[in-house]
Amino acid sequence: MSGEDAVQRFEFATGDVLRAHEAIRDTFAGHRLLIRGSQEDFRYRQTTATAGDLSVDSLLHTTCVREEVDPIDAVWVGLVAGGRFQVGHAREQVSGTAGEVLLFPQGVDFTCEWRLMDLRVVRLPAAQVARRAAEVAGVDPRDFRFHGLTPISPALGRYCANTIGYVRSLFAGDDATIAEPLVRAAALDSVAAAVLATFPYSATDDEAARSVDHGTPASVRRALELIEARAHEPLTLHAIAEGARVGPRALQEAFRRHRDTTPMAHLRETRLDRAHRELLAADPTGGTTVASVAARWGFGHRGRFAEEYRRRFGRNPQQTLLS
């Protein structure tokens, strides 16, 4: 087994907050630390395993702190196992509780904050994710970027959490298994696919991005952003108009004039895209069906859903599920 293939493991435990954050800096990134909680009975425990470009971390930290973290250029996705973990930057702050996943910001200073952190993290190269996006969505790797830190739907959040659990189980087993290049490559690809399916990135809101120009009214931009963020919710025209801060009739007219569509038609197309992504990510042997995915995204009539799906993607939804 070469040095590149070997699994590297690091385990560390301490009751000293400063020593804990030395380990965090060495493993993850430079940061400035503000301790907000009691250090009495403090515990920190970390296990990290790395094979090639893929790393899996388990972290337990038992006092309240805030970190200001230097920019990272890798993709980190976290699964909250306990407590509440908050991460964000100037434009977005998100938090997760047990069972929820979140994405760490890339390329900017960001903050992390918690009272109790019980967190699982999977780290992989951004280039790997960008290459996967190029394969599945035709995104130029040079243009690839994420646009949000939370899952686009609860179902895809669970899918990502399950993928993290699967990869962690590989690292918990025999080192010889995860050290195998083909096993490691498959695990890396599984994580990249799950992250792309779960979090919004450049291919998922190209339409919204194209609309953000000087000729598009602010009300339309606000409506597009709301639809992107809340497509999994039971939105009505009145709710979208309220978020856009105009009346329903004015919003309808603005969409017709500047988008050649309506707000509800755009919502339906967005949901169709999300259903497509979920079918691409699904494991048909795990019980996922076209009908369940269609219903989750508001398509109650399977035949009509299949017709719209073929019009948009040029194939049947069942073919996508089984591919």
Image: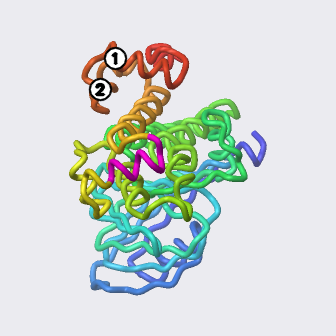
Q: Residue at left 29%, top 73%?
A: 115
Viewer-proximal residue among 104 and 201 = 201
> Which residue is the site of mark 1?
304
Where residue 207 sits in the image (x, y, percent)? 52, 46
Q: What secondary structure is the stretch in magenta mostly built from?
A: helix
Where residue 282 sits in the image (x, y, percent)? 43, 27
State the SS at label 2.
Answer: loop
Q: Is residue 36 above or below residue 319?
A: below
* Cα distance in 3D space between marks 2 and 1: 8 Å
Which mark, residue 241? none
Mark closer to the observer (2, 1)? 1
Viewer-proximal residue among 117 and 17 = 117
Q: Which residues are magenta?
A: 251-260
Q: Residue at left 45%, top 37%?
A: 166
Where residue 215 sits in the image (x, y, percent)? 54, 61
> Which residue is the site of mark 2?
299
Where residue 283 sits in the image (x, y, percent)? 44, 23
Please give left or right for residue 136 compared with residue 267 in the image. Answer: right
Q: Residue at left 36%, top 68%?
A: 86
Q: Amino acid at mark 2?
A: Phe
Q: Is residue 306 above or below residue 263?
A: above
Is there any visible trace of residue 43 in the rendered image?
yes
Please give left or right for residue 2 compared with residue 15 in the image. Answer: right
Q: Is residue 286 above or below residue 62?
A: above
Query: Which tag, 2 or 1, sits closer to the chain's start?
Result: 2
Please give left or right for residue 150 compared with residue 127 in the image. Answer: left
Residues tagged 2 and 1 counted as in contact (Cβ below 8 A): yes
Query: For the C terminus, which image quadrant?
Result: top right
Q: Amino acid at mark 1?
A: Arg
Q: Residue at left 22%, top 45%?
A: 236
State the SS at label 1.
Answer: helix
Q: Is residue 141 magenta?
A: no
